[in-house]
Amino acid sequence: MRRSVDEHLQAVLERIAPLPPFEQPLLETLGLVLCEDVDAAISLPGFDNSAMDGYAVQAADLAGASEDDPITLPVMGDIAAGRSRPLVVTQGTATRIMTGAPMPRGADAVVPVEWTDGGAVSVRIHRQPPVGNSIRRAAEDIRAGERVLDQGVTLGPRQLALLAAVGRSRVMARPRPRVVVISTGAELREPGSKLEHGQIYDSNSYTLAAAARQAGAIVYRVGIVADDEKQFLDTLSDQLVRADLVITTGGVSKGAYDVVKEVLRKTGTIDFPEVDMQPGKPQGFGVIGEDSTPIFTLPGNPVSAYVSFEVFIRPALRKLMGRLPYRRQSVTGVLLDDFSSPKGRRQFVRAAASRNEDGWMIRTVGGHGSHLLGGMSRANALIVVPEEVTGMRSGENAEVWLLDEEAS
């Protein structure tokens, strides 16, 4: 079976449904999609309050006050933030007031402490305030009953601040997908262990687990499974109970020990197409288990696995979370070097992107080999080369995915 990149992505997204929302504690919803409209139960501010540390006064009492001719008023008390007992400012008096404290009855202005001598018993004021000076009026920001957030918004720190300010401690949101990552291969060893001849450290599971976590998922890195059908099937069965999505890496090519492909092909629910892309040609996707959990089987070469994640799994995770757009932010940049591309395949070229007054400048990094991790570590972008293009030249414009820029 052979597919284009777009055909395979469409096949993936058609089988992915957003996770059902549930009510969650406010701080747990950071980065999640709000699944309800939120109306304010209270006004913001809820009462007239002082915008400054200073003195609550009747502005008319300070007519003509200046540096050369200050006016002195007796201080009748203090009002701190959080005070609930009401006070009254009468003609010819002042009350010391702190930022955020409720305005006392009778006062129509606040004199900032900087305009005074800071007195506690009496205060000398050398500037006349206008009526309403330094007062935050009740409901000037939000009125009770007003719509403050629409469902579908992604909740960031600013939105959480608003929800907390109007008294919401929990909201309906789609959860973070639970992602299980499994690496397969008899040659793999955990980082930090001793390598024998022919063995390599497992980098793929760390790459994919980190990428999934960065995309907003809760990640369970299972570790290494040998090229053994029973061990792989047992591991997979054990993990399905806590998975909304499974990622495996390795064992999907045409070799004699590609056990992932052999085991999962028997289920009849997973396709193993060759996708017209470089890197990442061998792909697998389908569903498994009683809950029809989506499973991606990625190639074992590290760059192929990472690019496959960006092209197919990141969109799937964002759809599970109900987030749009599904892919990374793309920009148009100017190439600074030449390279060739295979005809008939969409190539994703590792690149370093930087921006100056002329726009985005793009330079390739490392080689094109799907095993070259050094270049991938230095890349912050992928140049997307269409299938019909066989080469690009310095000075040409190219589409670029920015790997360090998250879609909203």
Image (spheres, rainbow, N blue to C red):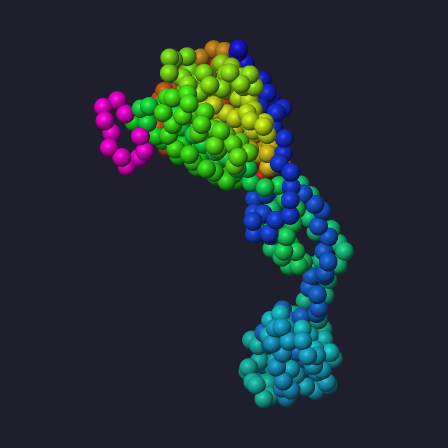
Q: Let me know if residue 275 appears in the view.
A: no
Q: Residue at x 60, y 32 (%)?
A: 319
| Residue toward you, 160 or 209 | 209
Q: Examine the image and state in which quarter residue 127 appears.
A: bottom right
| Residue toward you, 359 or 288 | 288
Magenta segment includes 198: yes
Q: Residue at x 60, y 88 (%)?
A: 122
Left or right position of 97 against 86 = left
Q: Examine the image and state in which quarter residue 82 appears.
A: bottom right
Q: Residue at x 72, y 61 (%)?
A: 43
State the image coordinates of residue 8 (x, y, percent, origin top left).
56, 19
Left or right position of 254 against 215 = left
Q: Let me know if residue 93 appears in the view.
A: yes
Magenta residues?
A: 189-199
Left or right position of 121 against 339 = right
Q: Which SS type dominates the magenta stretch?
A: loop
| Residue toward you, 52 or 32 | 32
State the image coordinates of residue 286 (x, y, percent, origin top left).
55, 22
Q: Is residue 110 above or below residue 388?
A: below
Magenta segment includes 352: no
The number of discs equals: 0
Task: Give the quarter of the figure containing the C terminus.
Answer: top right
State the image coordinates of residue 33 (x, y, percent, origin top left).
62, 42
Outermost residue toward the right in this view = 145
Q: Is residue 349 above or below residue 31?
A: above
State the image coordinates of residue 87 (x, y, percent, origin top left).
70, 81
